[in-house]
Image: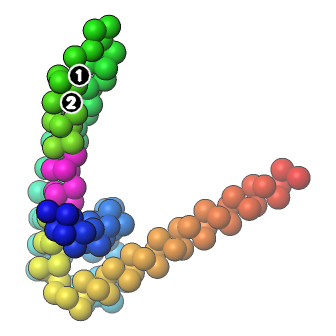
Amino acid sequence: MIVLIFLATPVLATAQEMVPGKWWHNPKVSRDLNLSDEEKDSLEQNFRESRRNLIDIKSRVEREQFELDNLLEDEKMNEETVKKQFQKLESERAKLSEERFNFVMKIRGIMGKDRFQKMKMFHEKARRDRVKRYMGNSQENRSSKK
């Protein structure tokens, strides 16, 4: 089990790092990845399905968190009940990660290995650019306060 988690960690990290939204509608990205109209339609369909699932799962996570908070606030806390509720919460969180991962796997299936790797590089560059802009804005804000 631990080996499976260890092996899945890089892929789960990819699911977490992917830019949210409909990047396949960006003309430059779409052109650079050579996406066909059919592939874009498939990405769109899978995105909508995954988004619906994520909304439902997030709602369940929030509900389980609410229940756990209530149990922790009780005057006479029952440890066993709290632990069971915590397990329910963690189970829903795992489903959330699994849904994100499933969407990444669908993208990989649509695009194939090479274009998927290229897309990951685009996302990494976009992330670095956002960090640079943020850091630049933070530096400007500090400089203007002096």
List x then y, in percent, for residue 66: 27, 25
The extreme top residue here reads 75
User: Overall secondary structure of the magenta stretch?
Assistant: helix
| Residue type of the residue flagged with mark 1 | Glu
- Which residue type does callout 2 highlight? Lys
- Are the residues at dot 1 and dot 2 in contact (C-beta closer than 8 Å)? yes
Give the residue at mark 2.
83
In this rendering, is residue 144 above or below 15?
above
Q: Residue at x 16, y 87 (%)?
A: 112
Mark 1: few/some/many CA within 10 Å (<14, 14-19, 20+): few
Residue 79: numbered disc: 1
Where is residue 43 shown, x and y percent of the image? 16, 71
Q: Which mark is residue 23?
A: none
Q: Is residue 8 above or below residue 30?
A: above
- Residue 117 coordinates in the image, percent (x, y): 29, 86
Q: Is residue 106 visible?
A: yes
Tell me which residue sits at (84%, 50%) in the image.
Answer: 145
Determine which quarter of the picture holds residue 41: bottom left
Q: Which corner quadrant of the image does residue 97 belong to? A: bottom left
Which quarter of the rendered picture does the N terminus lie within? Answer: bottom left
In the image, the segment drawn in magenta is 93-100
- Residue 68: percent from the left, percent from the top? 26, 26
Q: Residues within 10 Å of mark 2 (few under 14, many from 20)?
A: few
Q: Is residue 58 magenta?
A: no
Label 1, label 2: how far apart the Cα atoms are:
6 Å
Along the viewing direction, whichever of 1 and 34 lies nearer the viewer = 1
**SS class of the residue under badge 2?**
helix
